[in-house]
Amino acid sequence: MPDVLSAPLVVEFPFTRSLGPVQSAFLTGLRERTVLGVRTGAGLVLVPPVEYDPVTAEEIHDLVEVAATGTVTTWAWNPTPRRDQPLDTPFAWVLVRLDGADTALLHVLDAPGPEAVRTGMRVRVRWAATRTGAITDIACFEPYESEPGEPAPHDGEFADPVTGIVTPARLDYTYSPGRAQSAYLEALAGRRVVGERCPSCRKVYVPPRGACPTCGVATDERVEVGPRGTVTTFCVVNIKAKNLDIEVPYVYAHIALDGADLALHARIGGIPYDQVRMGLRVEPVWTEGSRHPDHYRPTGEPDADYDAYKELV
C-alpha cells in the first residue's frame, strides 16, 4: 500500500463587491478619519454599521459619528502574527466599544505584551498613514487614557465616496487525499489510471473516494481503466485565469474513461474549441516530468454512440 500523500494547498481569489449607502459612508469616513455608526429604531448605535436592523429587519440609515476612542470589552493575545495580519509584531485581538457606540468593533491593539492588556482599558484609533477607504485605514488601536465622548449626527456625505471594494480571500492548508486517492495519484505518476470497484453495485469510480457514493460501502478493489475515454459534456472557457498559461477560449470537459462509471474532468486540446462535441473519443497527453495528464486530445476514432455514455452525462 502506498504512503498517504499530503501537500500544502492554497485557495486564493479576489472578492469584489459593491457597497450600499451605509457601508459606502462608513468606509469613506474611515478614509477621512471619521468613524460612523448607524442608529436603530430602538436608539442603539451599531458600529460597524449595518443596513438592516438585526432585531426588526427594518432598513436603517440614520448615521451618527462616534469617537475614535473607546473601551476594550474583551481580548485575546496573538504571539505569532501570520502573513497579512495588521501588525507584524505580537498584538492583541480586541473588541472595542467606541465612545458613543453600543456594539464593539473587532480590530487589533498594539501593546508590548499580554500583561499590558486588560478588559476595560481605554484605547484610541491609530490611523494608517495612507488611507483608501477600507477597515485597514484603522492601522490598529493603542492605549490611551481619555474621557468617553458622545455620538453626533452625520449626513454621511463625503467627496469622492467609496462605492466598491476588492477583498482578497485566501485559505492555506495541508491537503491529505487519503488512501484511495493517494493510490490514484501514484498511478498517474506512472501514466496509469486506477479506480476502485464497489463490492455491492460493481461500479468503478475514478477518481476513487475509498467508498461507494451510491451504496456507502468501503471500496478497495483497484481497477485500471482507460486511458482513452469519451467526452460526455463540456464547456467553453472564455475568461483567462490568473497564473494559468492557457490561451482562451479553451474547452473543459467531463470524460468517461473506458471501464469507469464516473466521468472525470480535464482540458481538451489538439482540436479547435468549436469542434469539441459530446461523444468525442479522447486520450491523455502527458508532458515531460508531469505527474498527471496535461490535457486530452482526439484519438481519431469514430464518435461514441450516445447510448454508450448517456448514464454519465
Image (cartoon, grey):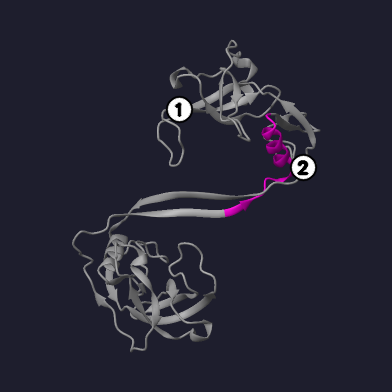
Name the dominant secondary structure of the magenta segment. Answer: helix
Picture quarter with the N terminus: top right
Judge left or right: residue 140 versus residue 188: left
- State the residue lying farthest toward the top: 302
Picture quarter with the C terminus: top right
User: What's the residue type where badge 1 is placed?
Assistant: Tyr
Which dot marks residue 250? 1
Q: Is residue 220 visible?
A: yes
User: What's the residue type where badge 2 is placed?
Assistant: Pro
* Residue 293 vertical placement versus 136 (above, below): above
Judge left or right: residue 93 versus residue 129: right
* Residue that appears at 50% across and 77% down: 75
- State the residue lying farthest toward the left: 159
**Residue 116 % position (x, y):** 49, 86
Which dot marks residue 2? 2
**Magenta highlight range:** 173-191
**Residue 51 % position (x, y):** 34, 61
Q: Nearer the viewer, residue 70 or 184?
A: 184
* Residue that appears at 37% across and 66% down: 136
Residue 35 lies in the magenta stretch: no
Which dot marks residue 82? none
